[in-house]
Image (cartoon, helix red, strand yellow):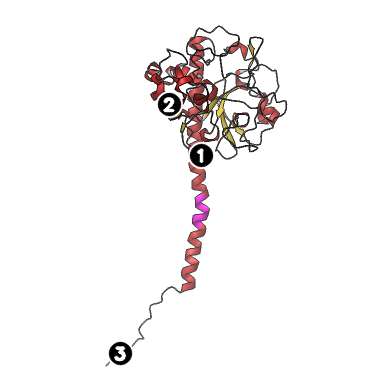
Amino acid sequence: MQGPTHPRSRLRAFTLIELLVVIAIIAVLIALLLPAVQAAREAARRAQCTNNLKQIGLACHNYVDVNSSFPSQIAGYNYSGGCAWFGNSDYRTSWLVQILPQMDQTPLFNSYNFTGDRAEYSWNNVTVIGLQLNVVMCPSYAGPMLQQGQSDWNSYAGSETASMASWYIAGTCYKGSMGDNTTGIWPGSTNTLGDCSNNQPTATGIFWRAQMLVTIQAVTDGLSNTMLAGEALPNMCNWNAWTESNSSVATTSIPMNQQTNLNPKAWNYCFGFRSQHPGGMNAAVCDGSVRFLKLTINQNIYRAISTRAKGEVVSGDSY
């Protein structure tokens, strides 16, 4: 006997609406996940930036142990103090050049030719000044690290100026703090950058753009309360080079990430600190630590933490 027959089951496919719903759900999940991935990547970049500044801060301390002062803007260790601009036989090299041996870069330091007039403009150093040094590169900065026609090389190179316009100059994402020296349109401006007065520098920070020595004892505001260096963006200022004294410093009188004038040729606007980290920037402190300064920091506090001996009282939770 033939058994009962069963109707063939029909295979059911996705409808167009169901497919669109699934695609929409996946898109929402990706949209929720992407910011988290980007935040994780930025956190890693910020951590690497912190490590770079930590190395620079520790190198400065090792330099102090050997030379009894923070690195100066000269090639040797025989400058006794006071304040002076460079003469034709001075070297105009940066504080970052001085701490190369303390950053395990002794061969690079030894390859730098300190002889001759203004050695940093010399053909003998064209390879060194064009070298991209990893420790001064912030991973959050996506712009170029090499620059042609860098301002100081064009302005002060003398007979070699025309040739130097075609040189590649390696930049830095970290600049030494000159303090709260005023410049540009900012309150109390004198359009100076800590220049000499009665043979004494008016620079209030740890570094200046010419000859100045700062000892540990001179930082009377306290090492843990005084900023050593902060971040910079090489493509935002034509004065940017890790090997040159006037291009490796910045001032807190200009607000962090200022937006008033973004012309990289405007020195009285671009000599400030800048960062591409969301919400602020990393800063090395004179005690060897690294802190994150919020973009919303009060300008008076921002200036106060960059001075070495003004006696300002700033609480740690104010920035």
Report x, y in % for residue 60: 51, 18
Secondary element under disc 1, as helix, strand or loop, is helix
Q: Earlier in the sequence, mark 3 or mark 2?
A: 3
The residue type indicated by label 3 comes to Gly
Q: Which residue position holds label 2? A: 163
Whole-angstrom CA distance, mark 3 to mark 1, is 71 Å
In the rendered structure, the answer to whether residue 298 lies left or right of residue 114 reads right
The quadrant where residue 302 appears: top right
The residue type indicated by label 1 comes to Ala
Report x, y in % for residue 250: 58, 26
Report x, y in % for residue 203: 63, 18
Above or below, comparing residue 119 to residue 174 in the picture: above
Q: Residue at x 51, y 14 (%)?
A: 74
The disc placed on residue 13 is: none
Which numbered disc, 1 or 2, marks the residue closer to the eye?
2
Q: Which residues are magenta?
A: 29-34
- As drawn, the residue found furthest toward the right would be 188
Is 246 inside the magenta-drawn segment?
no
Whole-angstrom CA distance, mark 3 to mark 2, is 101 Å
The residue type indicated by label 2 comes to Ser
Q: Which residue position holds label 1? A: 43
Q: Earlier in the sequence, mark 1 or mark 2?
A: 1
In the rendered structure, the answer to whether residue 94 lies left or right of residue 126 reads right
Q: Which residue position holds label 3? A: 3
In the rendered structure, the answer to whether residue 124 lies left or right of residue 26 reads left
Q: Main secondary structure of the magenta part?
A: helix
Could you tell me if residue 99 is visible in this image? no
The quadrant where residue 115 appears: top left
Which numbered disc, 3 or 1, marks the residue closer to the eye?
1
Report x, y in % for residue 15: 45, 74
Q: Residue at x 33, y 88 (%)?
A: 5
Q: Residue at x 55, y 6 (%)?
A: 80
